[in-house]
Structures are given as C-alpha cells and as structure tokens.
Image: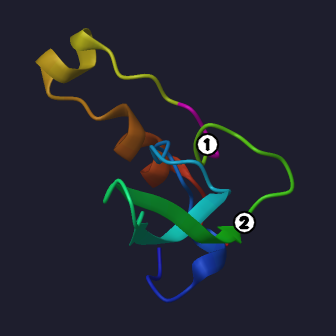
Amino acid sequence: MPLDNSQNLRNLTSMSSRPNGYSEARDFKLPNSKLTVGYSIRYYKFQDTDSPAVMPDKLIEPDWKSYKSGHDPVLEWILAQPVK
C-alpha cells in the first residue's frame, strides 16, 4: 500500500478522546478567594454527531488466543485489503 495515498488509510482502533469538544484552556484567579478557575475558549467540531471516540472503520476485538499465538488479526485484515 503506498504511504502517500491517503485514500487507502483505515482507522482500526478507537481513539480515546471525543472528536468534538472544548479546548484551548485558559484560567484566571478570583480576586477575593484567590481560587484559580479554568475555562475553555474554543469548541472544535470534527464530526456531525457526538461520539465517545473516533470509531474504527472495521472493529476487530482483541482476543487472548490470537495474542498468545502471535497472530495480529488487525494487521492480517489490513494486508488482505485490495490496493485501490
């Protein structure tokens, strides 16, 4: 698979953070209590629907039998895909 052809790329593992969310944190100190307050100044929306993670194109659950025998079902699935 050519590395420079992004159309052939696949996501096979979920990324742990939400694709949509607030970021770019700032803080300030309250004048009387001197407590520090944190807040975000920007909302990033990368998907139309909110999901708990960036979900894989093909979900392949890990299992102990494959791990123990040295097989990598994710890599095997990738290598079985036709090159476009």
Name the element at disc 2. Answer: loop
What quarter of the picture does the C terminus occupy?
A: bottom right
| Image coords of residue 26 (percent x, y) | 45, 73
Q: Which residue is mark 2?
A: 46
**In the rendered view, would you say 32 is above or below 14?**
below
Please, what secondary structure does the residue beneath circle 1 have? loop
Magenta-colored stretch includes residue 53:
no
Q: Is residue 52 left or right of residue 71?
A: right
- For residue 77, side relative to residue 33 (left or right): right
Give the label on residue 18, or none.
none
Between residue 14 and residue 31, name the one nearer to us.
31
Instruction: Name the residue located 31 percent from the left edge and 60 percent from the top edge.
Output: 34
For this orientation, the residue located farthest to the top is 65
- Work out whether 31 lies above or below 72: below
The amino acid marked with disc number 2 is: Phe
Q: Residues within 10 Å of mark 2 (few under 14, many from 20)?
A: few
Q: Give the x, y percent position of residue 78.
A: 47, 51
Name the front one of labels 2 and 1.
Answer: 2
State whether residue 9 appears in this view.
no
Q: Is residue 57 above or below residue 63?
A: below
* Residue type at numbered disc 1: Met
Describe residue 62's horizontal placement relative to residue 25 as left or right.
left
First to last magenta residue range: 55-59
Question: For the point 42% across and 63% down, which residue is it?
Answer: 30
Residue behind mark 1: 55
